[in-house]
Protein backbone atom coordinates (compact mmCIF):
# COMPACT_ATOMS: atom_id res chain seq x y z
CA UNK A 1 0.00 0.00 0.00
CA UNK A 2 1.35 3.42 -0.97
CA UNK A 3 1.74 5.88 1.89
CA UNK A 4 2.24 8.95 -0.30
CA UNK A 5 -1.17 9.29 -1.90
CA UNK A 6 -2.36 12.00 0.46
CA UNK A 7 1.01 13.65 0.80
CA UNK A 8 1.49 14.10 -2.94
CA UNK A 9 -1.89 15.67 -3.69
CA UNK A 10 -1.11 19.14 -2.37
CA UNK A 11 -3.88 18.89 0.22
CA UNK A 12 -2.26 21.37 2.61
CA UNK A 13 -1.98 23.94 -0.19
CA UNK A 14 -5.62 23.39 -1.17
CA UNK A 15 -6.82 23.86 2.41
CA UNK A 16 -4.73 27.03 2.68
CA UNK A 17 -6.27 28.46 -0.49
CA UNK A 18 -9.88 27.91 0.60
CA UNK A 19 -9.08 29.15 4.12
CA UNK A 20 -7.58 32.34 2.71
CA UNK A 21 -10.86 32.88 0.85
CA UNK A 22 -12.87 32.21 4.03
CA UNK A 23 -10.72 34.78 5.82
CA UNK A 24 -11.48 37.42 3.19
CA UNK A 25 -15.19 36.67 3.46
CA UNK A 26 -15.03 36.86 7.26
CA UNK A 27 -13.31 40.26 7.18
CA UNK A 28 -15.79 41.69 4.66
CA UNK A 29 -18.76 40.27 6.55
CA UNK A 30 -17.53 41.81 9.80
CA UNK A 31 -17.10 45.17 8.08
CA UNK A 32 -20.69 44.96 6.82
CA UNK A 33 -21.96 44.14 10.32
CA UNK A 34 -20.10 47.09 11.84
CA UNK A 35 -21.26 49.54 9.16
CA UNK A 36 -24.86 48.38 9.61
CA UNK A 37 -24.72 48.70 13.39
CA UNK A 38 -22.94 52.04 13.19
CA UNK A 39 -25.72 53.44 11.02
CA UNK A 40 -28.27 52.09 13.51
CA UNK A 41 -26.35 53.65 16.42
CA UNK A 42 -25.85 50.33 18.20
CA UNK A 43 -22.91 48.29 19.52
CA UNK A 44 -22.12 44.93 17.95
CA UNK A 45 -23.00 42.16 20.42
CA UNK A 46 -24.41 38.65 20.22
CA UNK A 47 -26.91 37.73 18.98
CA UNK A 48 -26.41 39.71 15.79
CA UNK A 49 -29.64 41.39 14.70
CA UNK A 50 -29.87 40.34 11.06
CA UNK A 51 -32.68 42.86 10.56
CA UNK A 52 -30.21 45.70 11.14
CA UNK A 53 -28.15 44.35 8.26
CA UNK A 54 -31.10 43.87 5.90
CA UNK A 55 -32.28 47.40 6.68
CA UNK A 56 -28.81 48.77 5.91
CA UNK A 57 -28.80 46.89 2.59
CA UNK A 58 -32.41 47.96 1.86
CA UNK A 59 -33.59 44.36 1.66
CA UNK A 60 -37.27 43.68 2.34
CA UNK A 61 -37.95 40.66 4.55
CA UNK A 62 -41.32 38.91 4.73
CA UNK A 63 -42.67 35.75 6.32
CA UNK A 64 -44.96 33.22 4.66
CA UNK A 65 -45.74 29.50 4.62
CA UNK A 66 -43.34 28.15 2.02
CA UNK A 67 -44.18 24.47 2.53
CA UNK A 68 -47.55 23.02 1.65
CA UNK A 69 -49.14 20.51 4.00
CA UNK A 70 -48.54 16.96 2.87
CA UNK A 71 -45.48 17.85 0.80
CA UNK A 72 -43.67 14.84 -0.66
CA UNK A 73 -40.14 16.29 -0.53
CA UNK A 74 -37.59 15.62 2.22
CA UNK A 75 -36.11 19.10 1.81
CA UNK A 76 -37.87 21.91 3.65
CA UNK A 77 -37.89 25.25 1.87
CA UNK A 78 -36.73 27.87 4.37
CA UNK A 79 -36.26 30.98 2.28
CA UNK A 80 -36.68 32.51 -1.16
CA UNK A 81 -34.46 35.39 -2.29
CA UNK A 82 -35.46 37.46 -5.30
CA UNK A 83 -33.89 40.41 -7.10
CA UNK A 84 -36.06 42.30 -9.56
CA UNK A 85 -34.99 45.60 -11.08
CA UNK A 86 -32.68 46.34 -8.16
CA UNK A 87 -35.27 45.53 -5.46
CA UNK A 88 -34.33 42.70 -3.13
CA UNK A 89 -36.84 40.58 -1.25
CA UNK A 90 -36.32 37.66 1.14
CA UNK A 91 -39.29 35.51 2.13
CA UNK A 92 -38.72 33.13 5.05
CA UNK A 93 -40.90 30.24 6.14
CA UNK A 94 -43.10 31.24 9.06
CA UNK A 95 -43.53 27.73 10.44
CA UNK A 96 -39.92 27.11 11.54
CA UNK A 97 -38.03 28.15 14.66
CA UNK A 98 -36.68 31.62 15.35
CA UNK A 99 -33.06 30.46 14.95
CA UNK A 100 -33.86 28.84 11.61
CA UNK A 101 -35.61 31.98 10.33
CA UNK A 102 -32.61 34.09 11.33
CA UNK A 103 -30.25 31.86 9.43
CA UNK A 104 -32.54 31.74 6.40
CA UNK A 105 -32.47 35.54 6.25
CA UNK A 106 -28.68 35.57 6.63
CA UNK A 107 -28.40 33.00 3.83
CA UNK A 108 -30.63 35.23 1.69
CA UNK A 109 -28.31 38.16 2.36
CA UNK A 110 -25.44 35.95 1.25
CA UNK A 111 -27.28 35.08 -1.96
CA UNK A 112 -27.86 38.76 -2.62
CA UNK A 113 -24.23 39.72 -2.01
CA UNK A 114 -23.11 36.99 -4.41
CA UNK A 115 -25.47 38.30 -7.12
CA UNK A 116 -25.58 42.01 -6.32
CA UNK A 117 -25.10 43.18 -9.91
CA UNK A 118 -27.95 41.07 -11.34
CA UNK A 119 -31.32 42.57 -12.20
CA UNK A 120 -33.21 39.28 -12.05
CA UNK A 121 -32.68 36.44 -9.60
CA UNK A 122 -34.70 33.87 -7.70
CA UNK A 123 -33.01 31.42 -5.33
CA UNK A 124 -34.44 28.95 -2.87
CA UNK A 125 -32.78 27.94 0.39
CA UNK A 126 -33.72 24.48 1.67
CA UNK A 127 -32.31 21.84 4.03
CA UNK A 128 -31.32 19.16 5.07
CA UNK A 129 -30.36 17.41 1.81
CA UNK A 130 -27.12 18.11 -0.06
CA UNK A 131 -27.19 21.38 -2.08
CA UNK A 132 -27.12 21.21 -5.85
CA UNK A 133 -24.84 24.21 -6.34
CA UNK A 134 -21.67 25.51 -4.72
CA UNK A 135 -23.26 28.96 -4.54
CA UNK A 136 -25.44 27.75 -1.69
CA UNK A 137 -22.32 26.74 0.21
CA UNK A 138 -20.78 30.16 -0.50
CA UNK A 139 -23.96 31.86 0.78
CA UNK A 140 -23.74 29.74 3.93
CA UNK A 141 -20.17 30.92 4.54
CA UNK A 142 -21.29 34.56 4.29
CA UNK A 143 -24.31 33.87 6.53
CA UNK A 144 -22.14 32.28 9.20
CA UNK A 145 -19.73 35.21 9.39
CA UNK A 146 -22.57 37.73 9.43
CA UNK A 147 -24.18 36.01 12.41
CA UNK A 148 -20.83 35.23 14.07
CA UNK A 149 -18.33 38.03 13.29
CA UNK A 150 -14.78 36.95 14.06
CA UNK A 151 -13.91 39.59 16.68
CA UNK A 152 -17.22 39.17 18.52
CA UNK A 153 -16.65 35.41 18.47
CA UNK A 154 -13.15 35.79 19.91
CA UNK A 155 -14.46 38.06 22.67
CA UNK A 156 -17.17 35.53 23.55
CA UNK A 157 -14.79 32.57 23.54
CA UNK A 158 -12.27 34.41 25.70
CA UNK A 159 -14.95 35.42 28.19
CA UNK A 160 -16.24 31.84 28.31
CA UNK A 161 -12.78 30.42 28.98
CA UNK A 162 -12.09 33.01 31.67
CA UNK A 163 -15.29 32.03 33.47
CA UNK A 164 -14.97 28.26 32.94
CA UNK A 165 -13.76 26.13 35.88
CA UNK A 166 -13.70 22.82 33.99
CA UNK A 167 -10.38 21.37 32.87
CA UNK A 168 -10.33 20.16 30.14
CA UNK A 169 -13.06 22.18 28.43
CA UNK A 170 -16.31 20.32 27.71
CA UNK A 171 -16.62 21.11 24.02
CA UNK A 172 -20.29 20.06 23.85
CA UNK A 173 -21.22 22.53 26.58
CA UNK A 174 -19.23 25.27 24.84
CA UNK A 175 -20.94 24.65 21.48
CA UNK A 176 -24.35 24.64 23.18
CA UNK A 177 -23.50 27.93 24.86
CA UNK A 178 -22.27 29.46 21.60
CA UNK A 179 -25.36 28.38 19.67
CA UNK A 180 -27.63 29.94 22.28
CA UNK A 181 -25.53 33.10 22.47
CA UNK A 182 -25.40 33.55 18.69
CA UNK A 183 -28.90 32.14 18.14
CA UNK A 184 -27.67 29.78 15.43
CA UNK A 185 -29.14 26.30 14.96
CA UNK A 186 -26.92 23.29 15.80
CA UNK A 187 -27.04 22.15 12.15
CA UNK A 188 -25.64 25.43 10.82
CA UNK A 189 -23.24 25.98 13.72
CA UNK A 190 -21.73 22.53 13.21
CA UNK A 191 -20.77 23.55 9.68
CA UNK A 192 -19.77 27.11 10.49
CA UNK A 193 -17.61 26.34 13.52
CA UNK A 194 -15.12 24.50 11.33
CA UNK A 195 -14.91 27.50 9.00
CA UNK A 196 -14.37 29.81 11.98
CA UNK A 197 -11.53 27.58 13.23
CA UNK A 198 -9.92 27.65 9.80
CA UNK A 199 -10.05 31.44 9.59
CA UNK A 200 -8.68 32.05 13.07
CA UNK A 201 -5.88 29.53 12.54
CA UNK A 202 -5.01 31.14 9.20
CA UNK A 203 -4.99 34.66 10.65
CA UNK A 204 -2.85 33.47 13.56
CA UNK A 205 -0.30 31.98 11.15
CA UNK A 206 -0.28 35.16 9.09
CA UNK A 207 0.48 37.13 12.24
CA UNK A 208 3.32 34.73 13.13
CA UNK A 209 4.74 35.15 9.62
CA UNK A 210 5.07 38.91 10.13
CA UNK A 211 7.60 38.20 12.89
CA UNK A 212 9.48 35.43 11.11
CA UNK A 213 7.66 32.78 13.19
CA UNK A 214 9.68 33.93 16.22
CA UNK A 215 7.29 33.78 19.17
CA UNK A 216 9.62 35.92 21.29
CA UNK A 217 9.10 38.84 18.91
CA UNK A 218 5.32 38.60 18.89
CA UNK A 219 3.43 41.29 20.80
CA UNK A 220 1.14 40.02 23.54
CA UNK A 221 -2.15 38.74 22.13
CA UNK A 222 -5.15 39.25 24.39
CA UNK A 223 -6.81 36.33 22.62
CA UNK A 224 -3.88 33.96 23.13
CA UNK A 225 -5.90 31.78 25.50
CA UNK A 226 -8.36 30.70 22.80
CA UNK A 227 -5.62 28.99 20.76
CA UNK A 228 -4.33 25.50 21.53
Image (cartoon, rainbow, N blue to C red):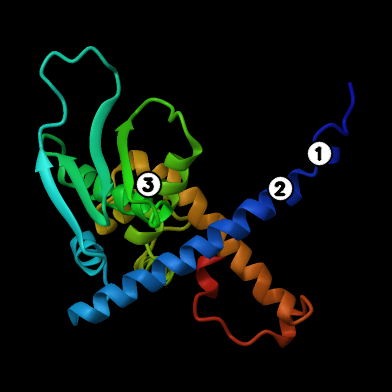
Query: Considering only order in the chain, which callout, 2 or 1, is on the residue closer to the N terminus?
Result: 1
Q: Tell me residue 66's x, y (percent).
A: 15, 31
Q: Which mark is residue 9?
A: 1
Name which residue lies at 40% across and 46% down: 140
The C terminus appears in which quarter of the rendering? bottom right
Side (left or right) of 82 relative to 113: left
| Circle 3: element type | helix
* In this rendering, the label closer to the viewer, 2 or 3: 2
Query: Considering only order in the chain, which callout, 1 or 3, is on the residue closer to the N terminus?
Result: 1
Side (left or right) of 6 relative to 120: right
Q: Tell me residue 165's x, y (percent).
A: 38, 63
Q: In terms of depth relative to the viewer, which is nearer, 84 or 103? A: 84
Task: Give the residue number, with chain letter if any, for mark 3.
Answer: 189
- Circle 2 Cα neighbour tier, 10 Å, few/some/many (<14 / 14–19 / ≥20): few
Task: Give the residue number, with chain letter if any, for mark 2.
Answer: 14
Q: Which mark is residue 198?
A: none
In the picture shown, does residue 37 fall above or below 219?
A: above
| Circle 1: element type | helix
State the separation of the CA atoms marked 2 and 3.
23 Å
Q: Are marks 1 and 2 in contact (CB under 8 Å)?
A: yes
Image-quadrant location for residue 172:
top left
Name which residue lies at 47% across and 34% down: 133
Query: Considering only order in the chain, which callout, 3 or 2, is on the residue closer to the N terminus?
Result: 2
Q: In terms of depth relative to the viewer, which is nearer, 48 or 175? A: 48
Amino acid sequence: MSTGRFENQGINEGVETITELYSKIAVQAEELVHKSYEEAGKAVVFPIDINIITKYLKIKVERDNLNLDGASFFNRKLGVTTIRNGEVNIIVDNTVSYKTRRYAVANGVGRYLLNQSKDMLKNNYAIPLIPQSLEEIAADVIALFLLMPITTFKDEFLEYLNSCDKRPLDVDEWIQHLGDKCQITPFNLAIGYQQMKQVLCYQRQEEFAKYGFDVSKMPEDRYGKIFA
